[in-house]
Image: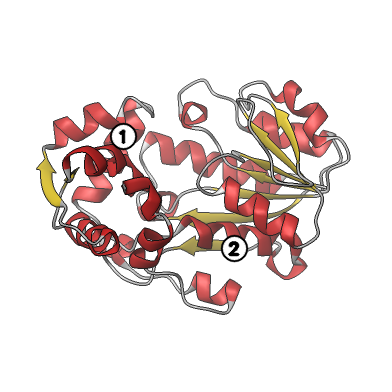
Amino acid sequence: MIVVTGATGNVGRPLTRVLAEAGQQVTAVSRHAAAAADGVRHVTADLADPAGLEPALAGAKALFLLLSGDMHAAGAGPADIIAAAEAGGVRRVVLLSTQGVATRPFGATRIAMRALEDVLRESGLEWAILRPGGFASNALWWADSIRTRGIAAAPFGDVGVPIVDPADIAETAAACLLDDRHSGGVYELTGPEVITPRQQTEAIAAALGRPVRFHDLTRDEAKAAMAQSMPAELAEDTLTILGSPNPAELRVSPDVQRVLGRAPRPFADWATRNIAAFH
């Protein structure tokens, strides 16, 4: 049995599908009730209450750990989840961390994530750590405005980073959960090219077959919008990276190719597969 947290999200959903298609028994964990794929068990649990994870972890051999936004806030105890996994007999944990742990190690949220990485390393478990950069699926923030007004709004319209397709994160996670060769691996996950928000908008417009106008938000406007779904400090950190990426954050990593044996998917591929969200 493999337990997938965040199972209804942009990484957890395709990961659950990949594992099920590989013939694995899967328990999908999310905070709210949700439909699960055929053959997948769903458990409702809140990561802020590790004791509540016990039914999901019973009999599990591996855990994919994806923290919700509130688990990055001050006072959260994500290390307790690793302890609960170990106590429940889990043998392997794959942690979804962040590229910023290596590229900007001194921010509060990244210090906390690095501390969680260290807890996992020092546990008695087998482990692998995934450090993605920005997600292609963040473009879904534009879905409503593109559908209704033909506009995509974001800050730093002409500043790019090599954003990664969540499907590539999911497939890499599946490989780390299933293949002993990846035990102890730390993988930085990016897309194949630097792409700006304006260029992402053009790719979505091409997939839609109609024009989409790009609107540059101010940093304050973007922070106010992001703070509705994540801690303000995490929003501030994210905006700093998006506005002034350093050389390490502009680097295209070879790790997707290294794990999966193929190049990472470009943003245009993600846009085409997800274009229904923008119609």
Nearest to viewer (mark 2 / mark 1): 2
**Residue 190 location, x and y as percent?**
41, 64
Whether residue 163 is situated above or below residue 72 in the rendered picture = below
Describe residue 243's horizontal placement relative to residue 256 as left or right.
left
Residue annotated with mark 1 = 235
Residue type at mark 2: give it.
Thr
**Residue 90 location, x and y as percent?**
82, 44
When asked about the image quadrant of residue 21, the answer is bottom right
**Residue 73 location, x and y as percent?**
45, 25
Residue type at mark 1: give it.
Ala
Residue at 63% x, 31% y is 34
Circle 1 residues within 10 Å: few <14, some 14–19, many ≥20: some
Q: CA distance from mark 2 to mark 1?
A: 26 Å
The answer, for residue 124, to whether it is visible in the render is no
Q: Toward the viewer: 53 or 81?
A: 53
The answer, for residue 20, to whether it is visible in the render is yes
Circle 2 residues within 10 Å: few <14, some 14–19, many ≥20: many
Residue annotated with mark 2 = 172
Residue at 33% x, 69% y is 251
Query: Circle 1 sits in a helix, a strand or a loop, which is it?
Result: helix
Describe residue 23's horizontal placement relative to residue 119 as left or right.
right
Residue at 52% x, 59% y is 167
**Residue 141 location, x and y as percent?**
31, 40
Describe residue 219's horizontal placement relative to residue 105 as left or right.
left
| First in residue order: circle 2 vs circle 1 | 2
Q: How many marks?
A: 2
Query: Circle 2 sits in a helix, a strand or a loop, which is it?
Result: helix
Q: Toward the viewer: 228 or 111?
A: 228
